[in-house]
Amino acid sequence: MYREAGGHALDSANLKALSPLDGRYSSKTASLREYLSEYALIRYRVLIEVSWARHLANESKIKDLKPLNSQTEGELTALLQDFDLKDAIEVKNIEAKTNHDVKAVEYFLREKFGPPLSTFFHFGCTSEDINNLAYALMLRDARNKVLIPLMDALITDLRELAHQFSDLPMISRTHGQPATPTTLGKEIANFVARLRRQRQIFDELVVYGKCNGAVGNFNAHIAAYPSANWKGISERFVTSLGLQPNVYTTQIEPHDWLAEYGQALIRFNNVLIDLTRDFWGYISLGYFRRVTSEAEVGSSTMPHKVNPIEFENAEGNLGMANAILEFLARKLTKSRWQRDLTDSTVLRNAGVALGHSVIAYESCQKGLNKLEVDAGRISADLKENWEILAEAVQTVMRRHGMTDAYEQLKELTRGRGIDQKALHQFIRSSALPKKEKNRLLKMKPEDYLGMAAKLAKDV
């Protein structure tokens, strides 16, 4: 066995994996395998086929399939609860003969249950009726059970940091140049608010599904049971799965919600990319120190290096995730006429995009937990830039009717730093009332914070 960083065991299959998600990062993406692996897809397909047959058994107009007895219900429940890799392999063996993955699931179920139930598995369905519902549940469950908890944990950690450092004055940098002071907590609070909003949008996104036959018109259904309200039957079934029914489709559910899902995740990830770059920059400035481990190596040749690798890892994986999500959002909403198969192979990569996102969220959280704030370095940087008070001085001067206030401060400060002495000399020589002069002379860069501390505490 080989041990991955962090002590996780890897076998030879991991070392030969083509994708780093199933190799180097296999332990970090394990939580998604129950929802987005090939095994998961087969398991969810079985769930849809069984649920559809059960649903039909309870529809009075489907007279040839009576409500299931307790024994059959128990057997179906046990099949779903106990479905494991052995069952999935059995389905794959059937697929090897049929060369059709969804039909293999139907045959798998028909081998276990006799008529009349066996004849109502996949009744009236096209493969996409099963697939679209399976993927809808897979992506919904991956969102609710893996992504949202990771997002919440990250936002919680950031919120705690925002509160902890709400009062710590820090110089701002607009265009990379010294600017109006803020607090460290307020700058972190900005990310908390942004991430929280995007997380909410992602969480509330409506997931759609369809179950309406070969081209979306219930043709086969009506041929078999002309008097049944198939639109109502279908809508009740899709709703029972916790999904929103989409009535107007071709053979495929048009995947517009999938594009929205990907784009919502992209926006969350983009905010996080912004955060990783800011923290990387603050580490570079010395505002943060990384907690070191005696065994870790920063550089193979420079012993002094302690690199911000977690934020760099997060940024890289967020970029990978977004590239795939963007392609999925653009591709999946397009299908020639009533159906082409290009979405099928593409959709299998949804797990790859979510996998890179998961790695990024965990890396970012790990990076945050390894930081120490250097309050002295932050304070020294702020106190070296008295020119940032020029904004305050010229604004007070304007209040008192001095129309050239901005121009006076521009001449004093633009393109060069000034010290406390130079600024105070300017204030004393100005035409401001004595009371205002005295107030401005008492102001220091670390005092000029506006509502930064309160905003950080309120997030």
Image (cartoon, rainbow, N blue to C red):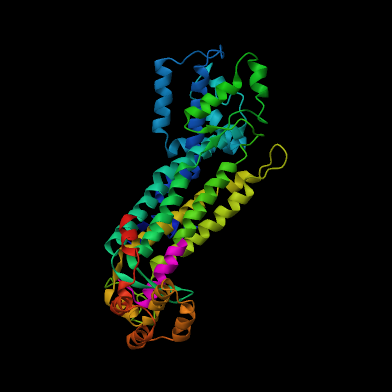
Question: Does residue 299 appear anywhere in the picture?
Answer: no
Q: For residue 122, what is the image quadrant?
A: top right
Measuring from the top left, give residue 195's x and y in whole percent.
42, 54
Residue at (60, 41) in percent of width and height:
255
Residue toward you, 412 or 112? 412
- Classify the position of the N terminus by image quarter: bottom left
> Magenta part of the protein: which range?
273-290
Q: Is residue 418 above or below residue 49?
A: below
Q: For residue 425, what is the image quadrant?
A: bottom left
Measuring from the top left, give residue 145's x and y in whole percent.
39, 43
Residue toward you, 286 or 444? 444
Asked if the magenta segment contains residue 342, the reply would be: no
Q: How many numbered markers are drawn?
A: 0
Q: Is residue 66 above or below residue 257?
A: above
Relative to 398, 287 lies left or right: left
Q: Is residue 298 above or below residue 113?
A: below
Relative to 210, 417 lies left or right: left
- Classify the position of the C terminus by image quarter: bottom left
Measuring from the top left, give residue 401's x and y in whole percent.
44, 74
Residue at (42, 65) in percent of width and height:
276
Measuring from the top left, give residue 219's x and y in whole percent.
68, 23
Relative to 334, 458 lies left or right: left
